[in-house]
Image: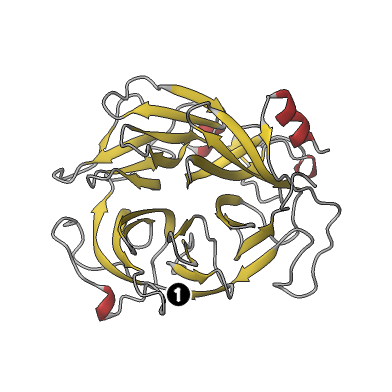
Amino acid sequence: MTRLSILAGTAALVLTGCATTSSIQRPTDACAPTEQFSFVCGANKPEDLAHISETPWIVASGFATGAGLKLVDSRTRQARFWFTAAADQVAPDPAYPDCATPPDPALFTARGLSLRMTGPGQGRLLVVNHGGREAIEVFAIDARDDTAPPTLRWQGCLAMPQGHVANAVASYSDGTVLATVLTRPGTSITDFVLGRATGGVYERGPRDRAFRLLPGTELPGNNGLETARDDSGFYVIAFGLREVVAYARTDTRQPLWRAQAPEFMPDNIHWDGNRLLLAGMVRDEPACGGLRQIINGVADGMLCHRGYAVAQLDPESRRFSLIAYGSPDPVFNGVSAAVLMGDDLWLGSYQADRIAIHRLPKNGMN
């Protein structure tokens, strides 16, 4: 077994459906399957993924200029640009007043996603945008017609504070929006790799005119974000510490609890049933010289291909269940998000030019 499963055992983890890989050959076709993955091509830097529940459709972000949003059919494994700013995709709502016009598709740089279903086949999609403005873009999703692809309409945006770059986004059922900032002005990636507080969680209620920093949420690299099912609080990833940190909504000055991920660096976090699903790169990767290095005072960009891991976290027991892990892949690096669709594990990446799909074993580890 690999070091991940050994470490998982020593941490008293419940292992479910883990998959290992042997040596991998670089494929000759640019988008051919590798030993551990098949791919959906044409999804430039799909940093985050969101499944439209009760449908075969997946939304992928695009963390590159003009990459925007993709709509993916999980049956055909085809992706297409979704938001083009066509007239029928724009319906401003006064509840989101900060932007008079929708994001320019040529600039739209989509990062974190949060999809909350508001009714049968209907939902509100929040998207972190860096293209042309630093804002949370708000879209209405309609997937009620099961004979046609879902539609979306841009409703407006919520601007981030001056100089602040959002990473992830989430919301409560009353419309309150939360966003993480990985590095506040004056801090750096190197700082959070060294364990220093760099980020924060910001909140904006339906009647607020701006986001405000929630006191006590300053962590080393505030990254993935999700709210509690009952709106009682939220969960945020401290990337520099590999921790999931839980807070109460009523008082954020001190965390409720912390749970450290087993030997991988979780990035995004989303609900999967009654558990939280996390995905990220392996922390101590021999192929990359081990731990993330700081060279000449700067943290390396982790462009060396690292292995990946996906785990579920039970917020009640605070125990992780490892779903899958694998060795470095020749064409897919920077794992940052995961969605489970039956026996298929869909993986997003903040570096790759595709979405990866890994078939999970039906019975136990292999």
Closer to the camera in the image, 115 or 362: 362
The colour scheme is secondary structure
Image position, residue 58 (x, y; %)? 48, 64
Q: Which residue is mark 1?
A: 81
> What residue do we see at 79% from left, 44% from top?
287
- Identity of the residue furthest to the front in this view: 363
Residue 296 appears anywhere in the view: no
Residue found 30% across the figure and 79% down from its top: 86
Residue 75: name its quadrant: bottom right
Occupied quadrant, residue 96:
bottom left
Secondary element at tag 1: strand
Please say if 174 is above or below 104: above
For this view, does 196 lie left or right of residue 92? right
Q: Nearer the viewer, residue 237 or 211?
A: 237
Point 21% across, 61% down: residue: 99
Q: Is residue 124 visible?
A: yes
Depicted 11 relative to depicted 206: above or below: above
Image quarter of the N terminus? top right
**Kind of residue at badge 1:** Phe
Percent x, y of residue 84: 36, 76
Foreground: 81 or 259? Answer: 259
Q: Is residue 284 left or right of residue 344?
A: right
